[in-house]
Image: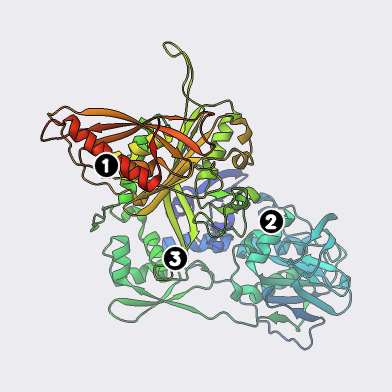
């Protein structure tokens, strides 16, 4: 926001203009009028100025915009005829080029600072909330408000020694700023110092040591251009915002520094008496070259949706002090005014043309866009998965992609595991948000545990989110060297059905629910899968399985190890087993489902009780049985049994096998022949026999 005096702007413009007309012009040009306060015969106006328009933080900047809109010429600021002379300047200056881009000094001798500040200067300052101090300081503030160049004044007689340094501070200092207010200077702040003390924090605030007062007889006027980023950081850290820092942070017209120092010095000499020394200092190691940009008329009209002629564009730009030359039938070579720091590219000029032409004069037309539909399997799979889970009674959660750096150690994941990742953020919010997650398991268990801490128990939740890895595949490595995989994870624990009317006991979630949910998901996609044991140490022994589909791993499932997940905050509140499954979304490839018709011939069901050892999985047994005959329609495990009469590594499985033919009615002899076939194979290959 910037405050200005309406009367002062009108005076600079040099012609009469009504308040409402001025406000309308500013609004049309993108500088929204925020507030208008009447003060006597004047109005103090507050407008919104974007950070890229520092030229509008002065009365001459406002007047320049008004004059350009009205097609009038703004009177040029006076040029003070001063010549810099390094050799005979009263101080030896050492300047760090990283701190100051330009540093101009003018000394005025023999002043009388007891003279009253001229009334027209005091009126402007008071209306804009700046308290008059003394003639010299008031003049410096007036110049800043009028031209936008922050000024700083030093009492020459208070400077110690002949050496002055402008540099970024190499250590911390404690100083007293103007008004005897203590402040701390940290490493990196730009400072101006003499042989003994800090004279000011450059661009922000001065110190009491060299403050100009009524007794000052010799004053040094400074107009500079400092590093914007350094000023911004120092101002934020010191929690000091001044009119000077407000302008330095946004940028200064470096070409005008020397002339501004001369204008201020001349006003001091005229009002306070005294004489400007002929020895002037101007540090300007890298003079700013004029900026030229080629503007294409065709590109301008294409982006704006207009048909403005080249002649009209030239007229627009030259009204706002952009100098234009024809380069070709389509190209205009434009010289950018030094104060327009925001115009650096062709598109900035195109924006300027739009602003001057008037946004209201550009007809709103929907662009014609040629779009090509691209089938997105992942999005479709996500929609389908979300529908499945909601139908199963799951709740969806959304969690951060960041997890603790200690996750891999906490879950016993080794470097060789496919779930291992070391993508640690360089600047994490805190240690709990340092690692980009390689799996959703931590996020989901944390969410489950948090719900338990809020007494929201017996939950089934799912999340669809991304996991992150380094891309080790050199042939297909992305430009970033990383890969992101969309996954779906779900977890549940506690009671699936609570006891109540007609239900005598709670029905708790079990491993079979996990397998059932997985089957439902793959059935909906018309995809087959099989399970293969894995060695994830965060799963209970013999419960962890990889999900294999189309010959590749697409996910994993298991009952989570309580000792492992109890390391997560609040996870100890979960007393029941926790079951988890995670699936890669891109690997769910929906297929056309095959229609199956029930046979018109009756089926025959028989049960078999086999004795197995713990190193033999049911999957192996089922595979041998199903491969023994195409007449076996279904195999289902009905019960598992262990008792004290069995050996430690033995258990009993009860299978129910359904036989059926679509062509004829099966006979007992046919069934017995199939039975004998798979019983013999089980006995010979796996040493699995019927329980006696």
**Looking at the image, is mark 2 or mark 1 nearer the viewer?**
1
**Whether residue 81 is situated above or below residue 594 in the rendered picture:** below
Q: x%, y% of residue 222?
A: 73, 71
Question: Residue 276, labelled with which disc?
Answer: none
The numbered mark at residue 677 is 1
The x, y position of residue 289, in whole percent, is 53, 81
Compared to 451, does 532 lie above or below? below
Task: Please tell me how many numbered marks the rendered image carries.
Answer: 3
Q: Which residue is mark 3?
A: 72
Q: Secondary structure at mark 3?
A: loop
Distance CA(mark 2)–CA(mark 1) = 84 Å
Q: Is residue 159 left or right of residue 187?
A: right
Q: Name the quadrant containing residue 180.
A: bottom right
Figure quadrant of the C terminus:
top left
* 189 relative to 601, above or below: below
**Residue under circle 2?**
236
Q: Residue at coordinates 37% horizontally, 48% vertically from top-left?
A: 685
Give the CA separation, mark 1 to mark 3. 105 Å
Residue drawn at 69 percent across, 71 percent down: 223
Q: Earlier in the sequence, mark 1 or mark 3?
A: 3
Residue 435 can be seen, yes or no: yes
Structural distance between the alpha carbons of marks 3 and 2: 40 Å
The nearer-to-camera label among 1 and 3 is 1
**Mark 2 secondary-structure assignment:** helix
Query: Does the residue at mark 1 contact the one at mark 3 (Cβ under 8 Å)?
Result: no
Of residue 469 and residue 670, the one placed in the foreground of this image is 670
């Amino acid at each position: 926001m910037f405050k200005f005096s309406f009367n002062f702007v009108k005076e600079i413009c040099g012609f009469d203009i009504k308040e409402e007309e001025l406000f309308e012009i500013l609004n049309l040009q993108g500088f929204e009028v925020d507030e208008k306060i009447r003060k006597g015969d004047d109005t103090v106006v507050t407008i919104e100025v974007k950070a890229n328009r520092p030229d509008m933080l002065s009365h001459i900047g406002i007047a320049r915009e008004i004059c350009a809109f009205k097609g009038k010429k703004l009177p040029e600021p006076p040029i003070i005829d001063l010549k810099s002379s390094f050799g005979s300047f009263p101080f030896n200056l050492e300047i760090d080029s990283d701190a100051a881009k330009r540093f101009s000094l003018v000394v005025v001798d023999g002043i009388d600072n007891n003279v009253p500040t001229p009334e027209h200067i005091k009126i402007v300052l008071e209306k804009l909330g700046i308290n008059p101090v003394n003639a010299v300081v008031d003049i410096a503030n007036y110049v800043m408000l009028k031209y936008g160049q922050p000024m700083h004044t030093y009492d020459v007689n208070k400077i110690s020694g002949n050496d002055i340094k402008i540099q970024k501070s190499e250590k911390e200092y404690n100083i007293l700023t103007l008004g005897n207010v203590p402040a701390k200077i940290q490493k990196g702040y730009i400072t101006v110092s003499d042989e003994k003390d800090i004279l000011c924090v450059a661009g922000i605030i001065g110190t009491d040591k060299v403050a100009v007062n009524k007794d000052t007889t010799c004053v040094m006027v400074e107009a500079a251009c400092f590093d914007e980023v350094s000023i911004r950081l120092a101002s934020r850290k010191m929690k000091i915002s001044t009119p000077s820092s407000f302008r330095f942070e946004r940028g200064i017209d470096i070409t005008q520094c020397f002339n501004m120092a001369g204008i201020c010095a001349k006003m001091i000499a005229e009002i306070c008496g005294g004489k400007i020394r002929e020895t002037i200092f101007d540090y300007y190691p890298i003079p700013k070259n004029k900026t030229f940009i080629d503007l294409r008329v065709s590109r301008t009209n294409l982006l704006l949706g207009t048909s403005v002629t080249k002649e009209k564009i030239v007229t627009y730009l030259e009204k706002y002090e952009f100098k234009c030359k024809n380069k070709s039938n389509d190209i205009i070579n434009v010289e950018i005014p030094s104060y327009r720091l925001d115009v650096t590219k062709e598109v900035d000029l195109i924006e300027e043309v739009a602003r001057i032409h008037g946004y209201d004069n550009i007809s709103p037309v929907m662009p014609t866009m040629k779009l090509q539909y691209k089938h997105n399997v992942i999005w479709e799979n996500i929609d389908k998965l979300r529908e499945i889970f909601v139908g199963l009674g799951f709740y969806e959660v959304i969690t951060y992609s960041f997890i603790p750096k200690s996750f891999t150690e906490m879950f016993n994941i080794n470097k060789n595991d496919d779930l291992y990742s070391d993508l640690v953020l360089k600047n994490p919010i805190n240690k709990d948000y340092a690692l980009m997650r390689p799996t959703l398991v931590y996020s989901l268990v944390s969410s489950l545990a948090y719900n338990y801490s809020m007494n929201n128990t017996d939950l089934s939740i799912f999340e669809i989110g991304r996991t992150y890895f380094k891309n080790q595949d050199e042939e297909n490595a992305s430009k970033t060297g990383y890969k992101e995989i969309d996954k779906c994870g779900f977890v549940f624990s506690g009671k699936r059905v609570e006891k109540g009317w007609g239900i005598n006991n709670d029905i708790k979630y079990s491993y079979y629910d996990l397998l059932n949910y997985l089957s439902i998901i793959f059935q909906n996609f018309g995809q087959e899968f099989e399970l293969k044991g894995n060695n994830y140490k965060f799963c209970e022994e013999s419960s962890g399985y990889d999900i294999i589909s189309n010959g590749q791993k697409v996910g994993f499932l298991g009952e989570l190890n309580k000792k492992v997940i109890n390391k997560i905050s609040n996870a100890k509140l979960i007393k029941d087993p926790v079951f988890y499954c995670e699936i890669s979304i891109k690997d769910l490839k929906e297929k056309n489902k095959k229609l199956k018709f029930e046979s018109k011939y009756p089926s025959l069901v028989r049960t078999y009780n086999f004795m197995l050892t713990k190193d033999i999985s049911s999957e192996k047994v089922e595979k041998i049985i199903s491969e023994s005959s195409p007449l076996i329609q279904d195999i289902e495990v009905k019960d598992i049994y262990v008792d004290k009469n069995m050996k430690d590594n033995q258990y009993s499985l009860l299978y129910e096998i359904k036989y059926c033919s679509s062509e004829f009615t099966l006979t007992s002899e046919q069934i017995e022949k199939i039975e004998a076939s798979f019983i013999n194979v089980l006995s010979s290959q796996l040493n699995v026999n019927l329980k006696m």
